[in-house]
Image (cartoon, rainbow, N blue to C red):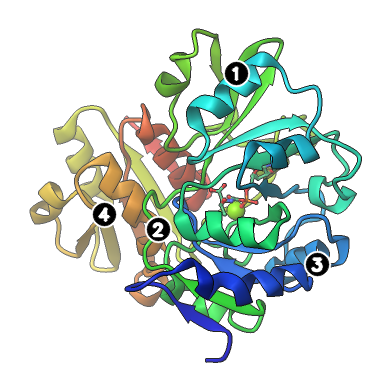
Amino acid sequence: MKNYLDCRKEYDKNKLIEAAEYIKNGKLVLFPTETVYGIGADGFNSEAVKNIFIAKGRAQDNPLILHVSNIEMVEDIAEYITPLEYEIMDKFFPGPLTLILKRKGIVPDVVTASLDTVGVRMPANKIAHDLIELSGVPVAAPSANVSGKPSGTNVQDIFSELKNRVDYIIDGGDTLVGLESTVIRVIDDEIHILRPGKITEKDLKVLGKKVIVDNHVLKIVNDNEKVLSPGMKYKHYAPDTKCLLIYSEDEDKLINKIKEYESNNTLIITKESHLSNFKNAISYGETLEEISHNIFKILRQVDKMNVSLVIIEGVNPEGLGLAIMNRLIRACSHNYVKI
Ligand code: TXA
Ligand code: MG
C-alpha cells in the first residue's frame, strides 16, 4: 500500500518526515501511542479535524484530545494552569494520562465540541512523540476505530476498517497498554477520574490530593444526565455478537455462574488458568496488564466465531481492573451479572 510506513522492526525519526508533512497539509495520519492507535490531524486546522469526525462517524459533541510533545505546547492551548495541574504533568507526562484544562481561544471549537476546556495528553510512545514534534502542532487524535467499535491496538485489526478513511498509516506494532488513557480533571483542587486507565486512583493519590472516581465509570448514563465528559454517554467497544459480563470475587462462584450460561453456542473469554473449566473458551491472559493489553484485540475477534452469546469473565474493579471493567461493561452494553 502507498502511504504505509512500517516501523515495527526498524525505526528512525527521519522516516516520519513524510507523515509529518501529511499532518501539516491537513491530512489524517494513523499512528501508534503507548495506549491505542490514534487518527491524527493538525489540531489547529478545523477542516482537518472535521475530517476526523467524518472518518470515525463520531458525534460532533464528543471532543478530541490534543496530543503534545512538550509543556510549551500545553501552554499554547491551555490557560490558567494551576500549580496542581503543573504537578500532575510533571509527574505523569509523558504517559497514558489526559488532563482536561481550561482552553485558550486559539483551539478550534470543533476540537473541544465548543466546551471551555481541552483534553491534553503527551504520549510516551517514541513514534507519537516524534510525529508531533516534526509536525510542530498539537495533534488532535481520537482512538483509531469507527465509533462504537473497540479501539485499535495494532494496524492489522483496523486496516480494512480504516484504510480508506485515513491518508497515511504508521505501523508501530502492538501498543503497550492496550486501553485508552486515564482522563482526569481538577476541580477545586480535587482530582476527578472521568475515564479510568493505566494511571490509577492510587497512582494519582501520590500527589496528596483527594481523588474522586466519577460515578459513571461503571454505570449507565441516562439520557439528559449531565456528565463531566461527553464520551461517557456513547456506545463503546461493542462487538455485534451479544456479550454478557459475569463477575464474582469468589472464584468458584464465578466459574459456576459462567457454566450456567454456557451452551453449545457460546464462547467464553476467561483467564488462562480457568480455560480448562469450559468447552469453547479463549484466554485474555492472566494478569491485569495482560488482559488490558489483549482485550480489544479479542473483542475484535468474537464476531468471527459464529456464536450466539459471548460470556466474558470480569475482573476485580480495582487498580487497572477498574479500567478493564469500565470497557467490558460497555462492550457488553451493560449486560452485567455480579454475584
Ligand atoms: O489513549 C488515548 O486517550 C487515545 C490515544 C489515541 O491518545 N485517545 C482516545 O481518544 O482515546 P478518544 O477521542 O477516543 O477519547 C477521548 C475521551 C472521550 O471520552 C472524550 O469525551 C473525552 O476524552 N474528552 C476529550 N476532551 C474532553 C474535554 N474537554 N472534557 C471532557 N472530556 C473530554
Ligand atoms: Mg475512543
Residue that mark 1 sits on: 191
Quick one: SS at disc 3?
helix
Quick one: SS at disc 2?
loop
**In which of the image's four quarters is ligand 1 placed?**
top right
Amino acid residing under circle 2 = Thr
Badge 1: residue crowd in 10 Å (few <14, some 14–19, many ≥20): many
Judged left or right of residue 234, residue 336 is left
Residue reaching furthest left? 276
Q: Which mark is residue 284?
A: 4
Distance from disc 4 to disc 1, alpha carbons, whole Å, reads: 31 Å
Distance from mark 2 CB to nearest ligand 1 atom below 8 Å: no
Q: Which mark is residue 175?
A: 2
Badge 4: residue crowd in 10 Å (few <14, some 14–19, many ≥20): many
In terms of sequence position, does the residue under pointer 1 or pointer 2 come before the other? 2
Is 258 drawn above or below residue 48 in the view shown? above
Judged left or right of residue 327, residue 292 is left
The answer to whether residue 294 is seen in the rendering is: yes
Q: Nearer the viewer, mark 4 or mark 3?
A: 3
Judged left or right of residue 78, residue 301 is left
* Residue drawn 71% across the image and 10% down it: 188
Quick one: SS at disc 4?
loop
Q: Which mark is residue 224?
A: none
